[in-house]
Amino acid sequence: MSDSTETVKRAFKHDWYQTEATVVVTVLIKNVQQDKLKINFNETNLGVNVQLDDGENYDLEYHLRHKIVPEQCSYKITPSKVRLVGDRENIKEQESKEKPEGEDAVNKLFQEIYGKGSDEVKKAMNKSYLESGGTVLSTNWDEIKKDKVPVKPPDGMEWKKWD
């Protein structure tokens, strides 16, 4: 994937990653309605157009380095949180009042456990997460220090090691 271009004044967080078989692009804009979103897949480009609540359009275009198969492409809309750049003190105040939801809530919980935890809790969390390939997170150092932590994928999933 190569550089992207945006044609609106505001910038929304967007990111991408790829595996051997897929490219995943994430654009974080809160409360996008299906009828206000246009996605254009073609062999060498990915275009995103969102009509924002204020009537302005947000356009994002990725120029792909390798060809894709547009018929095999898809997208999904999920609720997401978007933070716009603003006064640092106001942002801190707003963040302290916000109640995170979903994945953000889980991440915040793990951050609090790690941040307030003892050195043994931190060692246990680091060791369990790293040795299990991110499938196990434990705070019990007495249990974790004994052996290597095995990989435990979620039910219905299979662990594959990529060489």
Image: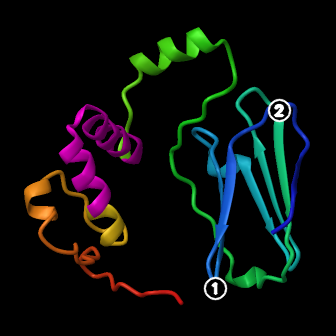
**Quarter of the image with the C terminus in it:** bottom right
Q: Given the image, on which type of amino acid does mark 2 rest? A: Glu
* Quarter location, residue 144: bottom left
Residue at 84% x, 81% y is: 66
Specify start and end residues of the magenta stretch as a single range.
103-127
Mark 2 and mark 1: Cα distance apart in space: 35 Å
Considering the numbered disc 1 on the image, is that residue within a helix, a strand or a loop?
A: loop
Q: Position of residue 71 (x, y in %)?
A: 73, 83
The numbered dot on residue 56 is: 2
The front one of 96 and 77 is 96
Report the side of 63 relative to 114 (left or right): right
The front one of 126 and 99 is 126
Report the side of 101 relative to 91 (left or right): left
Q: Given the image, on which type of amino acid does mark 1 rest? A: Ala
**Quarter of the image with the N terminus in it:** bottom right
* Quarter location, residue 91: top right
